[in-house]
Amino acid sequence: MQLPEKRGARVGVIFMGASLPVVPFLPFENGEKVAVAGGLVIVAEVVFWLGAVLAGPEAVRRIRGRWLRKPDPAPEPSRPGAGDDE
């Protein structure tokens, strides 16, 4: 049974996101837990960028645009009575 593309991506993201919080409860020594957690983070990063490369240059531009975008300036709050010159 093959999952639809979006559903498969969601399952993968949930699996990668849920695997890191489980690491502290594994029956390993502390040093091994640190190594496993670090490995999971590195694998998730590599998989993310491989997916971005496969998605194409436009997707990479959108990802970078979201991270590098400056926030819109907040509108100046209106003060009660401002502009009332009567």
Image: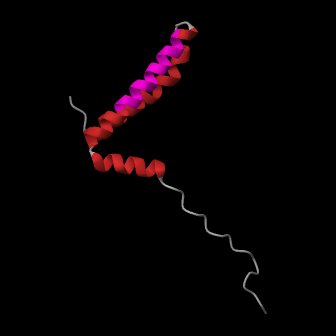
Q: Percent x, y for residue 54?
A: 26, 39
Q: Quadrant of residue 78?
A: bottom right
Secondary structure mostly seen in magenta is helix
Q: Is residue 50 visible?
A: yes
Picture coordinates of residue 31 (x, y %)?
55, 10
Residue visible at 35% across and 35% down in the picture: 49
Residue at image location 46% in from the left, 27% down from the top:
18
Q: Going by the picture, which residue comes out furthest to the right?
A: 86
Task: Based on the picture, tell me whether residue 34 belongs to the magenta stretch.
Answer: yes
Tally of numbered tags: 0
In-front residue for pair 64/26: 64
- Indicate whether residue 72 is drawn in magenta: no
Q: Nearer the viewer, residue 32 or 25?
A: 32
Residue 15 seen in this snapshot: no
Q: Which residues are magenta?
A: 32-47
Give the answer, above or below, for where 21 lies relative to 7.
Answer: above
Closest to the observer: 58 or 26?
58
When asked about the image quadrant of residue 74, the answer is bottom right
Furthest toward the left, the residue is 1
| Residue 75, image quadrant | bottom right
Check the picture and name the quadrant holding the N terminus.
top left
- Residue under the point 35% across and 30% down: 47
Q: Is residue 31 above or below residue 72?
A: above
The residue at 40%/28% (across/down) is 44
Q: Does residue 21 lie above or below 72 as drawn? A: above
26 lies left or right of 54: right
| Rendering coords of residue 52 (x, y %) | 32, 40
Q: Nearer the viewer, residue 52 or 23?
A: 52
Quarter placement of the C terminus: bottom right
Q: Position of residue 23 (x, y in %)?
A: 51, 17
Horizontal side of 69 relative to 84 (left or right) equals left
